[in-house]
Image: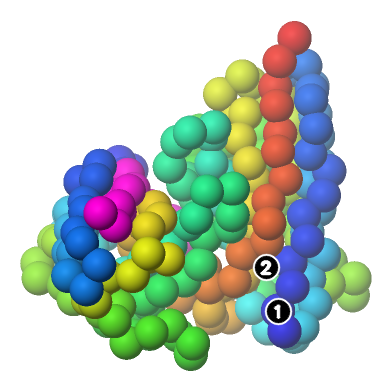
Amino acid sequence: QVQLVESGGGVVQPGRSLRLSCAASGFTFSSYGMHWVRQAPGKGLEWVALIWYDGGNKYNIDSVKGRFTISRDNSKNTLYLQMNSLRAEDTAVYYCAKDRLIYGYGGPDYWGQGTLVTVSS
Amino acid sequence: QSALTQPPSASGSPGQSVTISCTGTSSDVGGYNSVSWYQQHPGKAPKLMIYEVSKRPSGVPDRFSGSKSGNTASLTVSGLQAEDEADYYCSSYAGSNNYVFGTGTKVSVL
């Protein structure tokens, strides 16, 4: 069965960096687009970033452009989110999610359990 | 892009039906058939309930159905059960490799 396990969350000061990881199993990781989606405490879901099956193309929302980078290592079945210049408004549970399709046009189907990132001084 | 608009809450008695709307624009909901619905119980990860407007993944009860008209998509839960009480989110492909989620609807089973 599909399993996605995020790690790397924690408490970090504003302006600092953090790297999230998502270990995938139960499916052919290299054949699907992958997403990061976040949810601030008590708030709704917000799509953050998408990467194609081969890492050839990456996309993210405007509010994280130039600060967050999505990447993947298909040899390790792992998805990453490098987060730099963190702000208080980045505080959220970060979910990794598998897309239904190869390029990421199908939308997320399976989700991990999430990892909490708290940006606070 | 702005979040898709959903009603904050909806409710129904066991056995009744509830319908949740999800309103976007011609650049997202109205422009693509890549509309999905997710169920999220407190403290849990979202679960896919509907994709491509009206298709159900394997294992999702046929009590859940989806539709779309113009810029508005809808999720209907028929024969409400206690375990259906949760938050529901719509999402849509928004072009240029971007996605947008709805504001979320809390469904209560009275």
Q: Residue at coordinates 47% horizontally, 45% vertically from top-left?
A: A46
Marks 2 and 1 belong to one chain: yes
Residue bounds of the magenta highlight: B96-110
Residue B84 appears at what percent x and percent y? 37, 65
- State which quadrant residue B38 falls in: bottom left
Q: Residue at coordinates 22% horizontally, 73% vertically from top-left?
A: B15
Magenta segment includes B94: no
- State which quadrant residue B16 falls in: bottom left
Q: Nearer the viewer, residue A42 or A85?
A: A42
Q: Residue at coordinates 24% horizontally, 45% vertically from top-left?
A: B9
Q: Which mark is residue A2?
A: 1
- Rate crowding at label 1 as few (under 14), some (14 to 19) or many (20 or more) other CA atoms within 10 Å: few
Q: Which mark is residue A56?
A: 2
Q: Which mark is residue A109?
A: none
Type of amino acid under label 1: Val
* Left or right, A6 with reference to B2: right
